[in-house]
Image: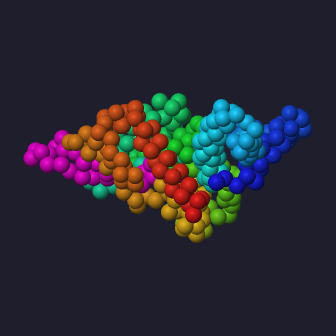
Amino acid sequence: MVPIDKVKEIITKHDALEKELSSGNIDSKLFAKKSKEYSNLGNIISIAREYVNFESEKKDLQNMVKDKSNDQEMIDLAQKDLSDLNKKKEKYENHLKLFLLPKDEDDNKNAIVEIRAGTGGLEASLFCADLFKMYEKVCSKKKWKLEIINISKSEAGGFKEVIFSVNGDDIYSYLKYESGVHRVQRIPETETQGRVHTSAATVAVLPEAEDVDIEIKESDLRIDVFRAGGPGGQSVNTTDSAVRITHLPSGVVVSQQDEKSQHKNKAKALKILRSRVYEAEKRKKDQERSSNRRSQIGTGDRSERIRTYNFPQGRVTDHRINLTLHKLDEFLSGEIHEDMNQELRLKEQSLKLENLSS
């Protein structure tokens, strides 16, 4: 059962925000935030209003059933309405429970995604490129903006590492489930015996931190500049445009040399560094709340093997929810990626609901 006081709080908050937003007397800096909160409450307000009236409606119907002066037809109708009301209440309770679940404060943020080739040599770097292409297609399908921050290429069109940002609505809430070790099983083109090789790539999804999220003091940074180098040690720039930034308190180091401008490289490096430091702080807090971590699917643990892509069998398996889709090509093309994501969300909600009830 959902505590009635919690439901009344939803109604009170919604009505207060409605009054505040319509008054016009609101700080412009807070307007967007409060408008979003009001819109979010608007998704549940009608259910909340009906829910608080259930008990009085139920009492009226029960009295009608007990009243001996009513004819049998009216009593039967009242009993049917009472049964329908209980079913409706149960349905509304589920909606309210999901709405009242603790939310990740970073869900509405943009994201920075880092993909790195792991074990498996050249095959791992090719898989790293495949994963990047998959996320490109997912972003295109959802009309999200993807921007490459840094890319390190290997032979045969593979990537040793690629870092990119994704901008749009509620990006982190979707992409956070991608953090972890992705494993691929397939026969490399260079394999003459037809043997299946296993290699891996690591995906890290960071909520994009803004200045207000975490304070990074200039005095805590060591900034080194150096000459950018290309593949095989060749020089790609005759000026010291590459930047390496070290955050001294945490030891986080970010190097950036993609741009010809030192200023642009510094801005990109700071963007990544801010998000990495923010994520490290977030991870520390999550570990302190270890009981909560048991109810999270998208914990962002990079060492966790989360998914296997098996090319000979044409399947992709997510090990966190034991879900296998025998449509690997469609998954990699971004067509059914959301199906997997939806199942991961539902599983996490289910675990959180169990936590809420216990």
Q: Residue at x 25, y 39 (%)?
A: 314
Magenta stretch: residue 276 in it?
Answer: no
| Residue placed furthest toward the left | 193
Question: Residue 86 versus residue 22: which sits nearer the camera?
Answer: 86
Question: Residue 90 versus residue 135: which sits nearer the camera?
Answer: 90
Q: Residue at x 56, y 60 (%)?
A: 355
Q: Residue at x 57, y 63 (%)?
A: 358
Does residue 282 appear in the picture of this structure?
yes
356 sits to left or right of 4: left
228 sits to left or right of 319: right
Q: Residue at x 51, y 32 (%)?
A: 142
Q: How many marks?
A: 0
Q: Position of residue 26 (x, y in %)?
A: 86, 40
Does residue 158 appear in the picture of this structure?
no
Colouring: rainbow
Question: Residue 24 versus residue 246: which sits nearer the camera?
Answer: 24
Q: Position of residue 194 (x, y in %)?
A: 12, 45
121 sits to left or right of 290: left
- Above or below for 25 versus 122: above
* Quadrant of the rendered image containing residue 53: top right
Question: Magenta stretch?
Answer: 177-206
Q: Position of residue 107 (x, y in %)?
A: 60, 47
- Above or below for 149 versus 216: above
Magenta stretch: residue 178 in it?
Answer: yes
Quarter of the figure that contains the N terminus: bottom right
* Quadrant of the rendered image containing residue 190: top left
Q: Position of residue 3 (x, y in %)?
A: 70, 55
